[in-house]
Structure formats: structure tokens, C-alpha cells
């Protein structure tokens, strides 16, 4: 695949550096349109910059000691506008900056007199990370960063294509064959939530749906609160939304909000970056990445932006409101790690959902995350005043949820099956995904067009169907090698609870590939899990089908309990690795000390399960720790040597200096001068001692001292003769 790159820099001062970067890009297979081919439209600098960057996959930013031309009416230079456009368009940026200590032609040096340049450089260093270069063009080396970027992009694209192709090939996975003939589609969803297009098969929650609809007639905010498995997502997606849009019938006495069929409806989940997801949801129809990027920035800066944006969207249309559904609101606490972003998201939702606003906000939230919500005063007040709790379905509602989907699709239920299902359900909390999965597995074991009691028992019944499906898939459909990969996948897709139950965790597909060479086998495992409806995937991400799988499958619970502390260490390390990579692999962000020891203890025997980035991060950290250990040992030896030197222990000092040199030869320690100094100091003391002995008439003893002195520190060039009465001579050279 050919990628397109844009190189942004000031013009004359970085001409040669820019040429080297362009050469490297082209040698790496990139298409590059140099700035020399462009002529600035100075009347519209922002559009000019956007046009230059639009359609590129990568922007390489070079910054020296000038910002370059600042167009009239602007506070930012053309180069800054290009950088801004790349960020707003979601284009990856690789920044490289002239080292502040590097020599540079004075005519191109405006650093001291341009505070905005200083601020921009500092911001990039702090928030994005940069590579450094010097005066000569050959000091700029973008190849390593480029290789990492290309590898990551190629892996992402390859995985997406493979999964799409494989999913097309397994299109008939749910259509079972009887005597070689396909007989229909399943009337149940298993562990997956019902979505808006599943409304024709969604039964049992008609009364609750009517209550939700009525609630929205004169209110702008609603929190649907319930336990995991209570059906929050399904009743909102397949009940409330179709009812509001008048695509699902309601009891005749229920009055819909006026004009609700004209409301635009947007459904989202917060994921790790809720502002990004909100902006993407609202701007999806525009097809403009730039519009999305701008909205993200504006949402982060001002709590009124959502309200203002929706008002603008609705102006000139027949709609007087927009319905925004935030499903799985608890992801704001399980996946989003940025408290500032959380607050901005909450503030925008609540500022828009006021009585005089034009946005109706509906959130679904797990009851065990109530305390997390109360950490935000405005959200606490909203939840206290505007919520509908979801309880368990009664017996008649459950009967409807079992019988009606089958009847709609022309399937029959063996007499006694419904009663057995209701008996097995009892008062099981969060039982809806258990029931739906048991029904799906019973349908797979049907006889003709009839779902049977025998098929239900064979499925594992309500309490055991999920575990049986997971265990059968794991033990019978996967090899031992694939089982190890499946274990890694399931643990990766679980978010460990902090004062709450464990939840599902969305993971980028590329992160599930420990090594590129294993991509095919990982894809095969993923597809097996998807076919069994244990895991769901989209173009970019994977997640377990429902938290019920985490609760109900003993093997997965055992894995999590055995590895809980280590998994937390690994998750923190993964975040650290991403930050290290984002900031151009700054050594200050590597693990040291107890953080390294803790992480290494967990991952040293499972490096193959780490992503390439995580593995490189921990191995680079290990190399740094080992180097610093050796340096500490050298420093200790040098201290000992110098202490021995001070007290005249020549041999100890010389030995310590020598050992220091051997301990870390790569440090290029210049110890010879220090060793020679020790020898001369000791030799001087020996000569002085010999002179005292000779003066006392102890000539033989004096001669030995002189010999030791000459042996320890012989003069470098000329012979030295020491006269010892009665006429003996010693010679040293």
C-alpha cells in the first residue's frame, strides 16, 4: 500500500534537512508532494494549509529556530497552521526539532526574540514528543519512526481486510442445516444486546418502554439505571428509540413527545475518549474529519458547545429536538482515564439537556457505578432527579420475551419448554443475557421447526448455557496453541473492577496480535469466538459479547482471579508504553526501580503475549536498568578507589580503579591518569621513607624503598640514579 506524506517546515533555513526527509520518505515508498510545488494563497491561509495537508496519511513536521511567515490577520505561521490542520484532520504527525544546543546560522535564529516560537516548541516537547536534529542534514534520521509507523498501519489494514473477508465467508454461521437445507435465522440474540434494527424481535418490555417514552415528553435528561444483565441497552435501543421514531407500536394510551418522529437520533458509547466519540457521532453524516477534530477541541474547552452545536444542526429543519443516547455510560469510568475529559463530557451533556435546550440526553448506566457518578456534583443532582431504575421482568414479560420472537419467525416451542425456562430462571438477577443465550443454543438444537426440551437441557439450561458454550468452544474447537491465544484474548477483553464487578473492555484488533507472524492464527481464534457469539468485533475493535460471560464462565473467572494483580501491572505498563511511543521514546518515560521490578516479574516469562510496542518498551527499560546498575557499580568502585587513594592504600586504589574500568568498558572512563597519580604519590612517599632510612645509616632497607618507588612509578624518559653508600648504584628507567 502506498501512503502519502506531507513535510511541513519553514522554507530556506531547512531546505537541505527537508530534502533529506523527502528522500527518506520516497525511499520508504511514500508519495510526497513537496512544498516547492505549492504557491500560497495568502488571502486564505487556513484553507491553503488544509488543502496542502488534506488527503495525506502522515505529516512530518520540522522545526528549527524560526516560525516562518505569519499571514496578515493571523497569530500563527503557515507552518503552525499546517500542523494544526494535520491534528484536526486526524493525520498522524511525526515532529522533529532542532536541538537548542546545536549551532545554527544567526540569520535564521529568531528563538530569543519570538516567545510564541518558544511556547510552541515547549508545547510539542511536553505533549507530543519530538526527535532532535543538528546543523547538518545527516543528523536528522526519521527512518526508525517511519518504520514503526508503516508497520503499525500495515498491520491494522491487513487485519481489517482479513477479518472482513473471513466474516463474509462465515455468513451462514448461524443458519443451521437440517438435511443439508438452510431453514432460517435465529429469533434470539444470545448475549448480544438488541439494537434498533432488532425491534421486531424485542418483546417483554412494552410497559417499561412506554414509561421511558412518557418520561421524555417534558424532560430533557433521563438515566436508565440497572444491574448488569437487566436489559438497559436493549430497552433503550430496541424499545425507546424505535418508539420515539414511530417504527414500533405502543399502547394506544401512550402519547409520544410532539414531533419525536422527526428527531435526529445519535447513539454512542464513551469508550476511552468520550469527547472524540461524541464528536464522531454528531459529525458522522458530514464526512468531515476536520469538522470532527474542531468539535473535539471545542467540547473540551467550553461546556456550552454541545448545546450550541445541536442548535445549529437543527436550525432550518423540521426537528425541534435531537435525541442523544449514551449507552454503557460506565465506560466513562472503566475505559476513560482522563478526569478532565470526563468532566468536559459530563458538563456538555448536562448543559445541553436543560429544560430550554434542544437536546434530549438518555444514558444507560450500571447500578454498581452509581458512586462513580456521584463524584460529579451536577451529575449527582441529575441522577437524583431524572432516573428510571430497571428491575427484573415479571413472569408474563418473560413469557412474552420467550414466545413472541419465535412466533414472529415461524418457530414452535415444545409444550413444557416455556414453563421449564421460567422455573429455571427463578429470581436470578441479571438473567436476561443468560435466558437469551440459552434460547439461542436451544434453537441451534431444534428438531425441524420446533425448539425442544431435550435441546434446552443439552444446551446447559439457563444457568449453564453460557459456560457450556464457552467451555465447548475453548476445549473442542481450539488447539492447545489456539487455547493459549484465546486465554490472552479473553483476559485482554476484561476490564478489572475497582470497587465494582469486572466489565468488558474494548481493545483494538491490532493489540490482540502479539507478533505479526501470528496474525493468521489469532484471526482464526477470533473468528471461532465470534462464531460462538462469545466475542463481537467491528472494523477496529473487539469485545466480549456481555459481562455475563465474565460472571458465568468459571474458567475465565479462575484466569482473572489468578492473574488479577499481574493484569493490573500489565495494563499500567501498556499505558506507559503508549505514552513512551507518543513522546518519541523519551528515556525519561521508561520504567526504572520498583516499577520495572514489578512489571518484569509479571511479564518476563510471557513476552510473546505482549504487543510489539509493549515488548519493546519493557526490553528497552530492562536494558536501561542494567546499564544504570553497571554505572552505579562503577561509581561505587570509583568512590572506594578515591577513598583508598586519600589514605595511601595504593594497591587497593589501583585495583579499584582497574575494576571500575572493566565493569563498564562502554563508559570510556579515563582512569589511567588517576592510576598514574596514585602511583606517583605512593612512590614519592617511598622515596621520602628511603631517604630517612639512608640518613639513619640503614642503607639496605633504604635501597628496598627506592626499588619499590622505581617499580611503582618509573620516570617516563630519563634514567634516574640513586647513590647508596658505600658506592652502590640503582638505576631506573
Image: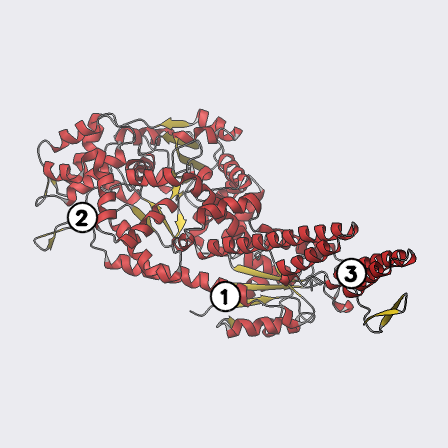
Rendered residue at 39%/61% (across/down):
516
Residue 363 at x, y percent in the picture: 41, 35
Q: Is residue 534 above or below residue 461?
A: below
The mark nearer the N terminus, 1 or 2, is 1
Rendered residue at 60%/52% (across/down):
629
Q: Marks 3 and 1, Cα distance to the nearest angstrom?
A: 53 Å
Q: Residues within 10 Å of mark 2 (few under 14, many from 20)?
A: some
Q: Residues within 10 Å of mark 1 (few under 14, many from 20)?
A: few
Reading the image, the residue beneath label 3 is: 679
State whether residue 241 appears in this view: no
The numbered dot on residue 185 is 2
Closer to the eye: label 3 or 1 = 3
Q: Marks 3 and 2, Cα distance to the nearest angstrom?
A: 92 Å
Rendered residue at 42%/30% (across/down):
219
Closer to the eye: label 3 or 2 = 3
Q: Which of the 4 image quadrants contains residue 675?
A: bottom right
The mark nearer the N terminus, 3 or 1, is 1
Q: Which of the 4 image quadrants contains residue 726?
A: bottom right
Q: Nearer the viewer, residue 120 or 526?
A: 526
Amino acid at each position: 500500500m502506498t501512503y502519502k506524506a506531507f513535510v511541513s517546515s519553514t522554507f530556506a533555513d531547512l531546505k537541505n534537512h527537508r530534502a533529506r526527509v523527502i528522500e527518506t520518505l520516497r525511499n520508504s515508498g511514500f508519495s510526497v508532494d513537496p512544498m516547492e510545488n505549492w504557491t500560497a494563497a495568502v488571502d486564505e491561509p487556513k484553507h491553503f494549509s488544509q488543502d496542502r495537508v488534506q488527503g495525506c496519511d502522515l505529516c512530518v513536521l520540522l522545526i528549527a529556530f524560526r516560525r516562518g511567515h505569519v499571514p496578515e490577520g493571523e497569530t500563527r505561521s503557515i507552518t503552525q497552521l499546517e500542523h494544526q490542520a494535520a491534528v484536526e484532520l486526524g493525520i498522524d504527525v511525526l515532529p522533529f526539532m532542532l536541538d537548542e544546543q546545536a549551532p545554527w546560522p544567526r540569520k535564521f535564529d529568531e528563538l530569543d526574540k519570538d516567545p510564541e516560537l518558544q511556547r510552541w516548541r515547549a508545547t510539542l516537547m511536553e505533549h507530543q514528543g519530538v526527535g532532535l536534529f543538528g546543523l547538518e542534514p545527516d543528523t536528522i534520521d526519521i527512518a526508525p519512526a517511519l518504520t514503526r509507523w508503516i508497520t503499525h498501519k500495515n498491520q491494522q489494514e491487513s487485519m481489517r481486510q482479513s477479518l472482513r473477508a473471513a466474516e463474509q465467508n462465515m455468513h451462514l454461521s448461524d443458519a443451521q442445516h437440517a438435511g443439508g437445507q438452510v431453514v432460517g435465522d435465529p429469533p434470539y440474540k444470545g448475549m448480544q444486546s438488541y439494537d434498533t434494527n432488532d425491534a421486531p424481535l424485542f418483546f417483554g418490555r412494552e410497559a417499561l418502554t412506554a414509561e421511558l417514552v412518557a418520561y421524555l415528553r417534558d424532560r430533557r435528561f433521563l438515566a436508565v439505571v440497572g444491574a448488569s444483565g437487566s436489559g438497559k441497552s436493549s430497552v433503550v435501543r430496541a424499545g425507546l428509540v424505535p418508539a420515539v421514531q414511530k417504527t414500533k407500536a405502543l399502547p394506544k394510551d401512550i402519547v409520544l413527545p410532539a414531533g419525536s418522529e422527526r428527531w435526529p437520533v445519535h447513539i454512542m458509547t464513551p469508550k476511552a475518549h468520550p469527547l472524540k466519540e461524541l464528536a464522531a457521532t454528531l459529525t458522522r453524516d458530514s464526512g468531515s474529519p476536520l469538522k470532527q477534530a474542531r468539535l473535539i477541541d471545542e467540547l473540551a474547552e467550553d461546556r456550552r458547545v454541545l448545546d450550541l452545536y445541536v442548535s445549529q444542526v437543527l436550525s432550518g429543519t423540521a426537528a425541534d429536538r435531537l435525541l442523544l443516547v449514551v449507552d454503557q455510560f460506565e465506560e466513562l469510568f472503566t475505559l476513560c482515564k482522563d478526569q478532565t475529559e470526563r468532566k468536559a463530557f459530563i458538563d456538555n451533556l448536562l448543559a445541553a439537556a436543560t429544560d430550554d435546550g434542544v437536546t434530549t440526553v438518555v444514558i444507560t448506566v450500571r447500578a454498581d457505578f452509581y458512586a462513580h457518578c456521584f463524584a460529579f456534583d451536577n451529575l449527582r443532582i441529575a441522577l437524583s432527579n431524572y432516573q428510571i431504575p430497571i428491575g427484573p421482568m415479571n413472569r408474563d414479560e418473560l413469557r412474552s420475551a420467550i414466545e413472541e420472537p419465535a412466533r414472529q419467525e415461524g418457530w414452535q416451542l415444545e409444550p413444557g419448554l416455556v414453563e421449564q425456562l421460567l422455573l429455571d430462571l427463578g429470581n436470578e438477577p441479571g438473567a436476561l443475557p443468560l435466558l437469551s443465550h440459552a434460547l439461542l443454543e436451544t434453537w441451534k438444537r431444534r428438531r425441524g421447526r420446533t425448539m425442544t426440551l431435550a435441546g434446552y437441557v443439552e444446551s446447559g439450561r439457563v444457568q449453564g448455557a453460557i459456560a457450556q458454550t464457552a467451555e465447548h468452544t475453548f476445549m473442542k474447537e481450539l488447539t492447545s496453541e489456539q487455547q493459549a491465544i484465546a486465554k490472552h484474548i479473553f483476559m485482554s477483553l476484561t476490564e478489572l473492577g475497582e470497587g465494582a464487578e469486572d466489565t468488558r473492555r474494548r481493545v483494538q484488533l491490532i493489540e490482540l496480535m502479539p507478533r505479526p507472524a501470528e496474525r493468521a492464527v489469532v484471526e482464526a481464534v477470533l473468528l471461532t469466538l465470534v462464531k460462538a457469539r462469545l466475542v463481537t468485533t467491528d472494523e477496529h475493535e473487539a469485545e466480549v459479547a456481555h459481562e455475563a460471560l465474565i460472571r458465568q464462565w468459571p474458567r475465565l473467572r479462575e484466569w482473572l482471579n489468578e492473574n488479577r494483580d499481574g493484569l493490573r501491572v500489565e495494563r499500567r505498563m501498556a499505558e506507559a508504553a503508549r505514552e513512551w511511543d507518543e513522546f518519541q521514546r523519551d528515556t525519561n518515560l521508561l520504567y526504572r526501580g520498583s516499577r520495572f521490578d514489578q512489571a518484569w516479574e509479571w511479564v518476563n516469562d510471557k513476552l510473546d503475549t505482549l504487543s510489539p510496542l509493549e515488548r519493546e518498551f519493557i526490553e528497552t527499560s530492562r536494558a536501561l536498568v542494567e546499564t544504570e546498575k553497571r554505572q552505579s557499580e562503577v561509581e561505587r568502585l570509583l568512590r572506594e578507589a578515591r577513598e583508598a587513594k586519600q589514605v595511601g592504600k595504593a594497591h587497593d586504589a589501583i585495583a579499584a580503579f582497574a575494576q571500575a574500568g572493566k565493569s563498564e568498558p562502554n563508559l570510556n572512563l579515563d582512569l589511567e591518569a588517576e592510576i598514574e597519580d596514585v602511583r606517583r604519590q605512593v612512590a614519592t612517599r617511598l622515596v621520602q621513607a628511603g631517604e630517612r632510612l639512608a640518613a639513619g645509616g640503614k642503607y639496605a632497607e633504604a635501597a628496598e624503598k627506592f626499588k619499590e618507588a622505581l617499580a611503582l612509578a618509573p620516570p617516563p624518559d630519563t634514567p634516574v640514579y640513586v647513590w647508596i653508600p658505600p658506592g652502590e648504584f640503582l638505576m631506573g628507567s
